[in-house]
Image: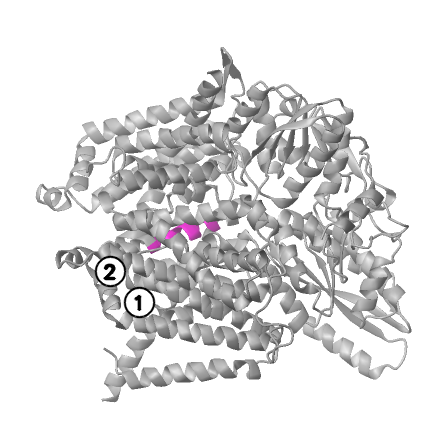
């Protein structure tokens, strides 16, 4: 175990930095990107639970983000529910879908899982595109409202307000992820990653814990999707495809798989990197792919792994 | 480069008291890379070319000032999130107020959903999804007519050919293709015909034999193919291979070269394409012929048939700014667009409603044409029976 | 009746392609336990290369195919050596993430070299046969026959040759195979070379009969894995039966149920098999 005090200080510094961010940045465009990055933090924390801690690659995170986004929007439109309620319900709807997919695919060995989740992402995409009576298909749903009425004391139209809203959510969900992985459940998840047969041998039914990790990760995605939908006020199926699920995997790997700080760093990386490296899609694919391969081979613990390694080396030298 | 022009503009604005030459940044958000770049890149080029022409002819005159246009183009990859990012960047970082381009429906829908709250004017090009102009967004106009406007004209045309039982095979998961078929069906039904089956295919499907076999069993009078050219070419070929010999109508807007890559000219013979007339040299005006020549010379490649939608946006914007007499008051410019007569320089053949280029919904209408494949080429046969005023009234009833 | 027969013929061509893709995947999986996700994109590269040699270089089709196969052979060796061997002893999740990264790279390279527009490998086979109302284009017939031939060759190779027996031995029990003197360093190389060549064949077939375009390879590899799940991981007969079942199911689903949801129906079949018979149709329990 690392010593706790320096890490706590780092977390606090990061939180203060993020809280001050809207006051520092002059160009509101970067606030917009930061909001997107914080939404990705939520989705990536979920991805990390199943991928990083439990050791199962799920390729449906963007599909679940989509389910969250569509369910919050549709519940608002069809049942007139208030926004805060639909944002809370969206992860639960997503969880139902996750149980339905996770149950068959997690009963069998690991390799099926990635493929089945991928197929499920494709199915979600096809249904979102074709079930136009419900989803409006490719044209998408417009005019999704922001939380809060027009007369509230907070101006939700203001991007700064929404930034703090998402920041609080991202911090809470990161905290929740930390609690989960430090609990008994979390230790069993890590044990599953390290040796699933052994976990079974001591009488723990591993699939229940795997299902828990998968469903929880889906709920994170559902929340991220709901927050995204009310921020952008427009959704269509395009951004809930397999390519975005791969981005979620990338965020976890780059940041540091199986660490709490990893997805936070990875999410900002995934959102801001394309901004600074403006290139065509083909180059983006080549570079992302290369980064994935090299990172997996040479730094399997991501940026966090490299950083802690460096810190440890410096500490040793100091003594 | 951009910084330089900005500083020049600032220096000029500060230094010269009257008749200053200023720079007006206009933005383009379009698919510059990726699969949709076939639509987006020519649009961005067309805006650039129009801007240079306008500058060469003395720029935009507002009161005593003359503005030279500077185009800032960002790649939205036809992706909704990327498009909101691109437009946010144009608005927040670059301070642009006039945004053009927009080839593709998903990305356009994303921007259209928030543009009403912004101090900006949005001009949409090739994106055909109807809902973009049904919400009467005051600061948005579109040069391309919605797909169902064309679909209705096509339905009338096919009904007039005497076909009663039409089978549809289309990219029906794409909203504007489905709406084309809906409008087609309405006109066909009105003439006593019917659509006997609607079969769908996905973007990456190339084997359409299962759908075509089903259609063959139902013995239609004609088939209607709506979708992107790449899968559509396979439908025309495989229909022949399966021995389907009824007339084939389509809404694909593909070039000869694109079809010949997949099917032989014999397999294509007699196929109809029922679409907005757009830019075809066979039916082009003088402006169209000049546009084609200039574009080809400047970019070393022939312009895509839909690229003038963006070219025409630029001239509409110029006229609107001059009519409004301001580059600051975007609401006034948006209002002026709604009152604008069709500019002289445009390439497409617009059908004005009440003498105006854009109707109350901000929608423009072009003529629609029936093209037929005859020995290796698309041949313009006739105008489709299009009713812009009636459609405009219909569009106003949708919310 | 004619309609059903026609739909079965329709499904056999794409089914044959699925079988070839799945054969490559299943041998890699059987030997190395790797879900080689980049297989579809690599296959499409083979198709693109053939197109390039025929269309841009003017080579005859047969020569282009030979060069593409040779390139596939080398490419298979490189993929094993450079991408998968470094993570051989790490957990499977790492190998899978490497596979995802590799997929992105190959897709990106395909885009960079060959562009976004679809390409079709030109051939001279444009006759159409008509057997009592069931039509079959010449090219389609050749694709089905070629697939059958390759399946037979692969089966013979695995069953009858010494290398094939070594491959089977490693698939059955890796440790025992080492004890028996099988070289576990060369077997993965052989397997990747062969599976990539099979993939290149599939890519050429897709390119000639249909088209190659961005994303088609990923679509195919997903179908290939669906075949594996249907037929049973690592099973060659399973890949053959699973591939044909999937291809024909899709055609029948599009023809008789719903063309918009034909892929969904295919995946529902896959998930049902997973629930009822997790080891697949031909897999050992």
Taking the image as drawn, is residue A273 in sight?
no
- The relative height of residue C247 versus residue A87 in the rendered view (above or below) is above
Q: x%, y% of residue C134? A: 49, 16
Q: Which residue is mark 1?
A: A258
Is residue B194 something one can see in this rendering? Answer: yes
Percent x, y for residue C248?
41, 28
Dominant SS in magenta: helix
Question: Could you tell whether B153 is left or right of A9 in the image?
Answer: right
Q: Quadrant of the N terminus of chain A?
A: bottom left
Q: Which chain letter goes with mark 1?
A: A
Label 2 neighbour load within 10 Å: few <14, some 14-19, many 20+: many
Magenta segment boundaries in residue numbering: C97-108
Image location of residue B28, percent across then percent down? 69, 60
Q: Which residue is drawn at the image coordinates 59% and 39% (left, top)? A: B172
Residue positioned 58% across, 18% down in the render: B243
Give whichever of discs 1 and 2 has the lower sequence position.
2
In the image, is B56 to the left or to the right of C52?
Answer: right
Find residue A263 and report its horizontal and vertical position in percent. Answer: 39, 68
Q: Secondary structure at mark 1?
A: loop
Res. A193 mark? 2
């Amino acid at each position: 175990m690392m010593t706790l005090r320096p890490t706590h200080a780092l977390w606090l510094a990061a939180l203060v930095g993020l809280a001050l961010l809207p006051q520092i940045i002059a160009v509101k465009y970067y606030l917009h990107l930061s909001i997107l990055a914080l939404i990705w933090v939520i989705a990536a924390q979920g991805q990390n639970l199943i991928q990083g801690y439990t050791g199962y690659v799920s390729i449906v995170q963007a599909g679940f983000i989509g389910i969250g986004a569509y369910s919050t929007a549709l519940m608002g439109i069809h049942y007139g529910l208030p926004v805060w309620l639909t944002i809370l319900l969206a992860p639960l709807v997503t969880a139902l879908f996750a149980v339905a997919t996770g149950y068959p695919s997690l009963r069998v060995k690991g390799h099926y899982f990635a493929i089945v989740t991928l197929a499920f992402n494709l199915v979600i995409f096809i249904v979102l595109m074709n079930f136009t009576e419900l989803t409006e298909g490719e044209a998408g749903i417009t005019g999704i409202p922001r939380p809060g009425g027009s007369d509230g004391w907070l101006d939700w139209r203001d991007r700064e307000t929404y930034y703090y809203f998402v920041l609080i959510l991202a911090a809470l969900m990161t905290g929740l992820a930390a609690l989960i992985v430090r609990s008994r459940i979390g230790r069993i998840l890590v044990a599953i990653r390290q040796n699933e047969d052994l976990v079974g041998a001591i009488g723990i039914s591993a699939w229940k814990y795997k299902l828990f990790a998968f469903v929880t990760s889906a709920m994170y995605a559902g929340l991220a999707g709901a927050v995204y939908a009310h921020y952008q006020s427009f959704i269509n199926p395009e951004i809930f495809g397999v390519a975005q699920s791969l981005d979620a995997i990338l965020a976890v790997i780059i940041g540091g798989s199986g660490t709490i700080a990893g997805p936070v760093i990875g999410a900002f990386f995934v959102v801001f990197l394309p901004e600074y490296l403006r290139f065509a899609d083909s180059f983006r694919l080549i570079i992302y792919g290369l980064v994935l391969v090299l990172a997996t081979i040479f730094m399997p613990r991501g940026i966090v792994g490299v950083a802690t390694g460096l810190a440890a080396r410096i500490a040793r030298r100091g003594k | 480069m951009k910084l330089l022009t900005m500083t020049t503009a600032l220096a000029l604005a500060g230094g010269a008291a009257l008749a200053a030459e200023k720079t007006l940044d206009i933005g383009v958000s379009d698919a510059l890379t990726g699969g949709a770049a076939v639509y987006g890149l020519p649009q961005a080029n067309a805006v650039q070319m129009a801007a240079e022409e306008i500058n060469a002819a003395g720029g935009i005159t507002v009161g005593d000032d003359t503005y030279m246009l500077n185009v800032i183009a960002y790649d939205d990859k036809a992706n909704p999130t990327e498009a909101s990012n691109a437009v946010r960047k144009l608005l927040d970082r670059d301070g642009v107020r006039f945004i053009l381009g927009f080839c593709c429906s998903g990305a356009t829908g994303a921007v259209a959903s928030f543009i009403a709250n912004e101090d900006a004017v949005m001009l949409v090009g090739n994106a055909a999804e109807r809902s973009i102009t049904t919400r009467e967004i005051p600061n948005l106009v579109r040069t391309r007519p919605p797909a169902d406007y064309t679909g209705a004209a096509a339905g009338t045309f096919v009904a007039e050919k005497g076909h009663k039982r039409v089978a549809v095979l289309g990219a029906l998961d794409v909203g504007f293709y489905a709406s084309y078929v809906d409008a087609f069906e309405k006109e066909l039904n009105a003439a006593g015909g019917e659509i006997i089956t609607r079969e769908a295919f996905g973007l990456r499907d190339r084997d359409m034999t299962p759908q075509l076999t089903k259609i063959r069993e139902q013995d239609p009078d004609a088939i209607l193919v709506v979708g992107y050219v790449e899968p559509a070419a396979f439908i025309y070929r495989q229909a022949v291979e399966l021995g389907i010999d009824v007339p084939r109508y389509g809404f694909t807007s593909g070039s000869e070269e694109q079809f010949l890559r997949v099917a032989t000219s014999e397999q294509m013979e007699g196929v109809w394409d029922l679409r907005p007339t757009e830019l075809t040299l066979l039916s082009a005006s003088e402006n169209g012929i000049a546009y084609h020549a200039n574009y080809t010379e400047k970019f070393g490649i022939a312009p895509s048939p839909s690229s003038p939608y963006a070219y025409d946006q630029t001239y509409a914007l110029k006229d609107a700014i001059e009519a409004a007499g301001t580059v600051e008051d975007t609401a006034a410019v948006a209002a002026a667009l709604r009152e604008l007569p069709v500019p002289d320089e445009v390439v497409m053949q617009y059908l004005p409603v009440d003498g105006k280029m854009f109707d109350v919904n901000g929608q423009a209408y072009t003529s629609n044409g029936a093209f037929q494949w005859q020995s290796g080429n698309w041949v313009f046969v006739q105008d489709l029976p299009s009713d812009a005023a009636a459609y405009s009234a219909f569009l106003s009833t949708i919310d | 009746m004619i309609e059903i027969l026609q739909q079965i013929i329709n499904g056999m061509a794409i089914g044959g392609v699925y079988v070839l893709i799945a054969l490559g995947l299943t041998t890699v999986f059987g030997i190395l336990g790797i879900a080689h996700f980049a297989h579809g994109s690599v296959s499409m590269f083979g198709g693109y290369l053939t197109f390039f040699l025929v269309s841009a270089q003017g080579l005859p089709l047969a020569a282009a195919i030979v060069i593409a196969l040779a390139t596939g052979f080398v490419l298979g060796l490189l993929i094993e050596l450079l991408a998968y061997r470094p993570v051989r002893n790490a957990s499977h999740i790492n190998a899978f993430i490497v596979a995802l990264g590799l997929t992105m790279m190959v897709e990106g390279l395909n885009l960079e070299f060959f562009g976004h527009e679809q390409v079709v490998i030109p051939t001279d086979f444009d006759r159409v046969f008509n057997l009592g109302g069931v039509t079959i284009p010449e090219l389609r017939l050749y694709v089905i026959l070629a697939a059958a031939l390759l399946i037979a060759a692969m089966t013979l190779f695995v069953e009858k040759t010494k290398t094939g027996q070594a491959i089977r031995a490693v698939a059955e029990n890796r440790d025992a195979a080492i004890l028996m003197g099988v070289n576990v360093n060369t077997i993965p190389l052989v397997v990747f070379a062969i599976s990539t060549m099979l993939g290149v064949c599939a890519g050429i077939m897709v390119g000639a009969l249909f088209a190659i375009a961005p994303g088609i390879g990923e679509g195919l590899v997903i179908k290939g894995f669906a075949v594996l799940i249907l037929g049973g991981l690592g099973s060659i007969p399973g890949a053959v039966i699973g591939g044909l079942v999937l291809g024909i199911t899709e055609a029948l689903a599009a023809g008789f149920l719903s063309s918009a949801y034909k892929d969904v129906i295919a995946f529902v079949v896959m998930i049902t098999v997973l629930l009822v018979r997790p080891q697949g149709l031909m897999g050992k329990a």
